[in-house]
Image: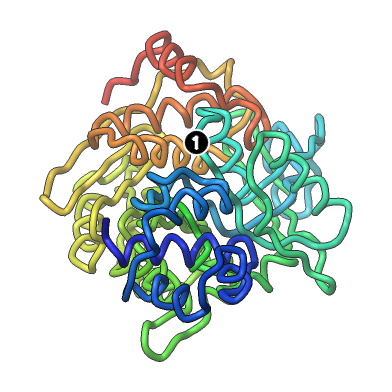
């Protein structure tokens, strides 16, 4: 039995249950000093106390002794997507007919979390974010609860509305976003008590769209970088996503976070924008060599495990051993595509699922691209996702495009 692990576990459980050291000591019939020594790793509880401590916190003795972390935390943007389907995007000053309107959750936290829950409901998933005290916020939170996702760490703004996006979606699946930052602009590290997180992996996004996290930090470069450092220090692996903001300062706001990321999951344009590179050649074809160069630069900047990049036709990964992998997208008939809102988050969910279960780099890309393809069958951000076995069947049914 390791005293530090046991002490950290007792301290974590105590904080999660909002119990003071004094109250715990009284419950167990020991002194405050004894509990303090346990939590600092300077001593052990009497072995006869372990069943009582485990029962008090509602955990097993094995969990108490090993301190096993389980599950995935998804943090970041929470919003309502108002999806409007149009035949084509109009020129300035012209009109476009809206064929239908639907409402769905949007943003990194709800999209990725719900997709993960639909892939495998057995994974403990928690969401951390900020919404307004309005109808839109209640809708977003209720949708998360519908899928059994823990929302206890969602905070509420009394001054800002729930963030929302007007999403213009054309038949090809391309979409354009008009976004109101709202409560997301207030979301900050102060909303996250890292000491109470009990997970293997924390994924957060979107960088460039989280004002408080994107703010400058003199020591780490950005507040996000400091936050990710602190999460890693707590023994939790980190993953990030970025928004495709044409006006975003990728170098100032993304690069400082890279040394504190285990995983980076972004698209080809975001990856290349970080280095002022063009992901596409003048003829409009994807420049694979440039994308790979941008990924290599991210590894060199300090990403500690894996960089994953997705695009419309192919997905790539590059690990710290220099292994580069590419997997083509599924060959989904155009007539079956209803939209691609949330496709990037669906890909992230598939990647996180593969990472969580220890898939190989190729398996991660194969599963993630199939999960993203499921998203194309529905107009909103989450309705298209399927359970794991159905995703694998869809991959087998449609095959992959030829590159």
Indicate how the structure is coloured in the image: rainbow
Task: Give the quarter of the figure containing the C terminus.
Answer: top left
Residue 335 quadrant? top right
Answer with left or right where residue 78 lies relative to residue 334. right
Answer with left or right where residue 226 lies relative to residue 58. left
Q: Nearer the viewer, residue 336 or 44?
A: 44
Give above or below for 155 relative to 341: below
Q: Nearer the viewer, residue 243 or 125?
A: 125
Give above or below for 279 relative to 252: above
Q: Secondary structure at mark 1?
A: loop
Is residue 28 among what the camera can see? yes
Give above or below for 393 relative to 171: above
- Residue drawn at (63%, 42%), measured in percent from left and top? 149
Answer with left or right where residue 330 lies relative to residue 321. right
Give residue 128's position: percent from left, percent from top: 61, 58
Task: Give the quarter of the figure containing the N terminus.
Answer: bottom left
Determine which residue is flagged by label 1.
Answer: 123
Give residue 118's position: percent from left, percent from top: 57, 29
Q: Residue furthest right?
A: 135
- Residue drawn at (39%, 64%), measured in percent from left and top? 45
Q: Nearer the viewer, residue 161 or 121?
A: 121
Tell me if mark 1 has few (under 14), some (14-19) or many (20+) residues whose alpha carbon lies within 10 angstroms of its own: some
Is residue 276 among what the camera can see? no
Residue 99 quadrant? top right
- Residue drawn at (21%, 63%), measured in percent from left and top? 297
């Amino acid at each position: 039995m390791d005293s530090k692990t046991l002490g950290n576990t007792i301290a974590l459980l105590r904080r999660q249950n909002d119990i003071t050291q004094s109250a715990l000591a009284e419950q167990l019939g020991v002194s405050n000093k004894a509990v303090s020594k346990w939590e600092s790793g300077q001593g052990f509880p009497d072995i006869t106390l372990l069943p009582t401590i485990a029962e008090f916190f509602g955990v097993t003795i094995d969990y108490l002794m090993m301190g096993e972390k389980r599950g995935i935390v998804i943090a970041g943007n929470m919003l309502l997507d108002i999806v409007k389907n149009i035949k084509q995007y109009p020129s300035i000053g012209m009109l476009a007919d809206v064929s239908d309107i639907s409402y769905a959750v949007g943003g990194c936290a709800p999209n990725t979390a719900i997709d993960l829950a639909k892939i495998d409901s057995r994974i403990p998933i928690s969401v951390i974010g900020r919404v307004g005290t309005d109808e839109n916020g209640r809708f977003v939170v209720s949708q998360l609860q519908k899928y059994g996702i823990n929302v206890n760490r969602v905070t509420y703004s009394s001054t800002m509305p729930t963030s929302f996006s007007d999403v213009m979606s054309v038949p090809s699946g391309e979409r354009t976003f008009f976004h109101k930052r709202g409560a997301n602009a207030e979301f900050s590290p102060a909303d996250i008590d890292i000491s109470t997180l009990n997970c293997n992996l924390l994924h957060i996004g979107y960088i460039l769209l989280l004002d408080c996290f994107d703010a400058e930090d003199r020591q780490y470069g950005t507040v996000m970088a400091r936050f990710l450092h602190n999460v890693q220090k707590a023994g939790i692996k980190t993953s990030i996503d970025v928004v495709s903001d044409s006006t975003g300062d990728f170098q100032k706001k993304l690069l400082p976070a890279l040394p504190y990321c285990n995983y980076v999951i972004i698209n080809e344009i975001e990856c290349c924008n970080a280095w002022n590179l063009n992901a596409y050649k003048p003829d409009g074809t994807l420049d694979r060599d440039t994308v790979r160069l941008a990924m290599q630069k991210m590894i060199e900047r300090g990403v500690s495990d894996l960089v994953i990049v997705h695009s419309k036709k192919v997905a790539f990964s590059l690990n710290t051993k220099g292994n580069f992998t590419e997997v083509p997208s599924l060959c989904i008939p155009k007539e079956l595509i209803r939209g691609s809102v949330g496709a990037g988050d669906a890909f992230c969910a598939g990647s996180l699922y593969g990472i969580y279960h220890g898939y190989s780099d190729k398996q991660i890309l194969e599963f993630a691209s199939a999960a993203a393809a499921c998203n194309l069958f529905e107009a909103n951000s989450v309705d298209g996702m399927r359970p794991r076995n159905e995703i694998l069947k869809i991959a087998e049914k449609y095959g992959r495009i030829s590159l």
